[in-house]
C-alpha cells in the first residue's frame, strides 16, 4: 500500500478536519505542512490548484469537504441510518454557513463597510450557533442522538479557525454545550495524542 | 404517509436541485413557491429561518445541500462505490466553488471594486469550469464514469442560477461538454416533463 500523506499549510483551516479524521481512524500518515513561500511550486501540480490534497491508497484526493466525507464513511462516523446521516449533514452545512458568514467582512477593505458587514455577520453567526446549541441540547451533547459523528469532529477541528476568522470575537462565549463538545472531542485518546504533539499553529 | 411539499421561492437557486431530484425519483409533491412579500410570515417558523424546506415522510428537512444529498442516496444517484461517491462529491463541491466565486462581486456596491472582483471571480470560474470540462471528457460526458449521478442533476439544476449570478457573462460558452450535460439531463423524461410544465422563473 502506498503511503498516506496529507499536504496543507501549518494552520487548522481546511486541513484540520482531515487530520482529526485520520487520527481518529488510526491511519498512520505523513502530515506535511508547507509554507506560503513553497506553495507556488506546488500549485500547478494540484488537481484544482488548491490545498489540501490527500494521497490515500494510491489516489490523490482533493476538495477538503469531499475528503472529510469520504473518511467519515470509512470510519463509520455518519450515524446509524439515513436520518442520522441527514442530521449530521445539516450540522456540517450549518457550521460551513458560520464560516462563510464571516468571510465577506474579513475580505472587506473599507473600514466603515467592514464594520457594518461584521455586525451583520455576527448577528447571523449568533443565530446559527444558538441553533447548533439547541441541537446539542436535544441530542445529549452531540449533533446526532448521543452518538459521536464526524460533525462533532469537524466542529472541534474548525473551532479555532472560526474564532480566528471572527476577528477576536468569542462567538462561542454563551454556548456552553458547543464549548463542552469541543473539549469532549479533543479529549478522545487519538485526538488528544495528536494535539499533544501537533506543531504550534497560528490558528 | 404525510404529503411531500417543497417550499421555496419561484427561482431555481437553492431549490431547483431538490425539484430535479424529486422529479427524477418519481415523487409526487407539492411545489409551493412563495413570494418575497410572503416570506416574513414564514421566517420564524423555519428551522434556520431559511428556505427551502422539504416536508418529507412526516419530517421537515432543511439545509438545501443536505436535502439533496439525502434524496440522492434514496434514489441511488451516488455511484457504485465509495470512490464514485467521492468523485461525485468533488464535482458537487467544485460547482459550489463556482457559485461562491461569483458571490463577492455580486454583493459589492462600489463600481471599481465590483469590476476588479468580477474579473478575479471570472478567472477562477474559467479555471474551475475547465477542470469540470476535463472531468466530463474523462468520464464519457458524466462527472462519474459514464453514469448518471446527482452531480449531473445538480449541475443542470444550478446552471441558470450560475449564469444569472455571473451577471450576463456566458461562463459556459467554451465548455461544450458542460452544455451537452445540461441538455442531456434536461432531456431525461421525468425532468423534461417537469420543465415543460414549470412556471416561468426569472432564473
Image: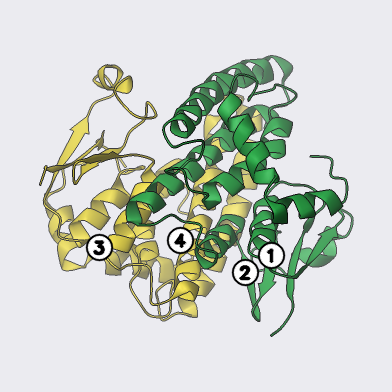
Chain colours: A green, B yellow
* Whether labels 1 and 4 share one chain: no
The residue pinned by badge 1 equals A53
Label 1 sits on a secondary structure element that is strand
User: Same chain for the residues at labels 3 and 1, yes or no?
Assistant: no
In three-dimensional space, the C-alpha distance between marks 3 and 1, rounded to whole angstroms, equals: 34 Å
Q: Position of residue A126 (x, y in %)?
A: 54, 21
Q: Quadrant of the C terminus of chain B?
A: top left
Identify the secondary structure beneath mark 2: strand
Distance (Cα) linking label 1 and label 4: 30 Å
Which of label 3 and label 1 is nearer to you? 1
Q: Which residue is at a point 32% across and 19% down the rendered structure image?
A: B44
Q: Which residue is mark 2?
A: A61
- Residue B186 circle label: 3
The disc placed on residue B173 is 4
Q: Is B32 on the left or on the right of B68, as rendered?
A: left
Of all chains, the one bearing label 1 is A
Label 2: how many Cα within 10 Å (few below 14, some 14–19, many 20+): many
Q: Position of residue B114 (x, y in %)?
A: 61, 33
Is tag 2's residue or tag 1's residue first in the polypeptide sequence?
1
**Contact check, label 2 and label 1, Cβ < 8 Å:** yes
Q: Quadrant of residue A41?
A: bottom right
Q: Give B128 or A92, whichever is nearer the viewer.
A: A92
Q: CA distance from mark 2 to mark 3?
A: 30 Å
How many tags in the picture? 4
At 63% across and 25% down in the image, what residue appears? A172
> How busy is the neighbourhood of tag 1: few (under 14 within 10 Å), some, or many (20 plus)?
many
Find the distance from the CA under tag 2 to the CA under tag 1.
6 Å
Amino acid at each position: 500500500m502506498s503511503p498516506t500523506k496529507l499536504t496543507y499549510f501549518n494552520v487548522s483551516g481546511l486541513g484540520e478536519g482531515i487530520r482529526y479524521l485520520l487520527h481518529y481512524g488510526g491511519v498512520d500518515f505523513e502530515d506535511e505542512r508547507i509554507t506560503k513561500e513553497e506553495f507556488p511550486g506546488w500549485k500547478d501540480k494540484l488537481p484544482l490548484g488548491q490545498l489540501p490534497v490527500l494521497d490515500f491508497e494510491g489516489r490523490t484526493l482533493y476538495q477538503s469537504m469531499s475528503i472529510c466525507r469520504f473518511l467519515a464513511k470509512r470510519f463509520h462516523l455518519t450515524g446509524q441510518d439515513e436520518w442520522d446521516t441527514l442530521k449530521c449533514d445539516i450540522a456540517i452545512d450549518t457550521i460551513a454557513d458560520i464560516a462563510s458568514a464571516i468571510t465577506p467582512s474579513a475580505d472587506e477593505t473599507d473600514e466603515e463597510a467592514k464594520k457594518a458587514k461584521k455586525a451583520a455577520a455576527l448577528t447571523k453567526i449568533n443565530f446559527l450557533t444558538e441553533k447548533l446549541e439547541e441541537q446539542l441540547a436535544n441530542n445529549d451533547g452531540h449533533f446526532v442522538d448521543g452518538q459521536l459523528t464526524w460533525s462533532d469532529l469537524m466542529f472541534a477541528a474548525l473551532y479555532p479557525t472560526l474564532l480566528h476568522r471572527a476577528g477576536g470575537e468569542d462567538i462561542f462565549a454563551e454556548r456552553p454545550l458547543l464549548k463542552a463538545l469541543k473539549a469532549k472531542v479533543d479529549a478522545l485518546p487519538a485526538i488528544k495524542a495528536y494535539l499533544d504533539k501537533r506543531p504550534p499553529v497560528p490558528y
